[in-house]
Amino acid sequence: MPETAARTQADVGRYVSDAWRERHFAACDAVYALGAPALAEEDVETSFGTTHVYRYGPTDEAARSRTPVVLVHGAGSCSAMWYPNTPALSSERPVYAIDTPGDPGRSVQRAPIHDPERAAQWLDETLAGLRLDRVHLVGSSYGGWLVLNQAHRRPGRLASVTPLDPGGLEKVGLRFFVWIFAGLFATFAPKAFRPRLAAWLEQPVLVVPELRTMIRTAVRSYRIRRPSPLPLSEEELSTIRTPLYLVLGKRSLLVHPQRQVERVPRLIPGAQAEIISDTGHGPQIDHADEVNRRMLNFMDSVD
């Protein structure tokens, strides 16, 4: 089915035009250039559309045989958001970064995946298409909901899951949406004011020109047609047996960190949970070196 056919479905994301899509891709490529160079890109066909995947890898032959890491980005973004993490992670393990269908990346959505079972099926089909039988799954924000949902519904391919300040633990509140819109409007602020606004809003996008451009073109070029996912219930969380490492920002506006750092290990046997200070919703960006180290240590302990 051509991409234009997807426009007839109200709950399938799309670009507003070919010209804006190419403009956004150019902005994304500038952000990708800040991270590790991709070894390859691949399109995986699924029941829900074409999933675009970036592959990174270590130069060490022994490291190339280790259990790979799969990265799932947040809503309204694409795999370029992992630029602070791909160098460290891919120096130790193979890394695959997935563009989620329905967000402004290079994947092409043809059917909705916001239903939890369909989301799990899409991700399982993507991993199967990549010929990956065992992976360390890492997800940020909406991607965090996807990895929690996967651990609940389709855990067969998962060596571990690492949700980073994830959705899926609490209902998304008004304070989070206010923060999102405030950060978007702040991208239009004069250059001299951006560092102060970035610190106040904890939005690194404001002081990284490539990120700022990518976010602005994403909003202008792409129409997301997906409702906010509902959180997993305590009964659903308690079914998870995959090793889990939860990372939260101390000043997160998506979840209540202290509540969840106590709740999740109580519900999920063996789960680890930590709060990163001096950050909000983006611990893997604001404190990339520390979070990269902690994630790799956790994966080593699982393997």
Image (tube, rainbow, N blue to C red):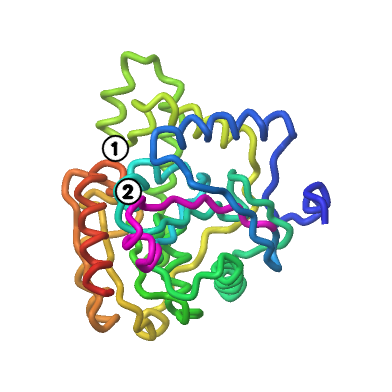
Residue name at image x 74 percent, y 55 percent: 10
Q: Residue furthest left?
A: 277
Amino acid type at circle 1 is Glu
Taking the magenta stretch, the answer to whether it contains residue 65 is yes
Give the alpha-carbon distance from disc 1 to disc 2, as whole Å: 8 Å
User: How many residues crowd mark 1 within 10 Å: few (<14), some (14–19), many (20+)?
Assistant: many
In the drawing, does residue 12 fall left or right of residue 243?
right
Where in the figure is residue 122, as x and y percent of width and height?
60, 68
Residue name at image x 45 percent, y 58 percent: 143
Residue name at image x 30 percent, y 30 percent: 198
Screen quadrant of the C terminus: bottom left
**One can see residue 122 in this view:** yes
Q: In the image, which residues are magenta?
A: 50-68
Residue name at image x 26 percent, y 32 percent: 200
Amino acid type at circle 2 is His
The quadrant in which residue 234 appears is: bottom left
Screen quadrant of the N terminus: bottom right
Taking the magenta stretch, the answer to whether it contains residue 64 is yes
The quadrant in which residue 287 appears is: top left
Q: Along the line of sight, which residue is nearer the eye, 80 or 237?
A: 80
Work out whether 10 lies above or below 270.
above
Where in the figure is residue 166, as x and y percent of width and height?
37, 60
Q: Which residue is mark 1?
A: 202
Q: Secondary structure at mark 1?
A: loop
Q: Earlier in the sequence, mark 1 or mark 2?
A: 1
Q: Badges 1 and 2: C-beta atoms under 8 Å apart?
A: yes
**One can see residue 260 in this view:** no
In the drawing, does residue 10 fall left or right of residue 226?
right
Q: Which residue is mark 2?
A: 281
Where in the figure is residue 98, as x and y percent of width and height?
52, 55
Q: Secondary structure at mark 2?
A: loop
